Image: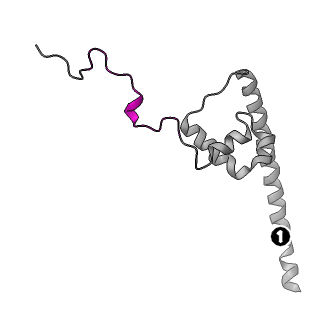
Amino acid sequence: MKDRESGAPLQFLILLVAGFLQRRQKMAIEYLLAENRVLRERLGPKRLRFTDAERRMLAERGKPVGRRLLEEIATLASPETLLRWGTDGWSPRSTTAAGALRRPPAGNGRTQPRSW
């Protein structure tokens, strides 16, 4: 019984610190949500274009959060879109070789300049 009572002050201290940290996290999240709303309003109704790396990063961060919470906090893309980006079936638009989407060389197709 005495061992149980000796741990009570430590448990109280841990709960106190955890509550403090949770409040700070909540305030930080609320600030970031407000900041995102302001930035989103400045951008207007334009569609945002994300790079493949940005899609991957948002999908990785969004998947553990889950659809229900994403519905409350996601402002840049819908939860369905974020979770779709995170599926294994999604791949970047350019699945061909790196140079395949480049413009062909000017002229008659020769890659070497003409030597006179």
Q: Please give the name of the residue rendered at 31% of the width and 16% of the height, measured from the top-left corner.
A: 106
In the image, farthest residue toward the left: 116
Q: Main secondary structure of the magenta part?
A: loop
In the image, farthest residue toward the bottom: 1
Q: Position of residue 63 (x, y in %)?
A: 68, 50
* Quadrant housing residue 109: top left
Q: Please give the name of the residue rendered at 80% of the width and 59% of the height, measured from the top-left corner.
A: 17
In the image, farthest residue toward the front: 108
* Quadrant housing residue 81: top right
Residue type (three-letter) at the residue carrying disc 1? Gln
Between 93 and 41, the one nearer to me in the picture: 93
Q: Which residues are magenta?
A: 92-109
Please name the residue that numbered disc 1 is placed on. 11
Q: Please give the name of the residue rendered at 73% of the width and 22% of the height, measured from the top-left corner.
A: 45
- Provide the secondary structure element on which disc 1 rests: helix
Quarter of the rendering occupied by the C terminus: top left
Q: Position of residue 20 (x, y in %)?
A: 82, 54
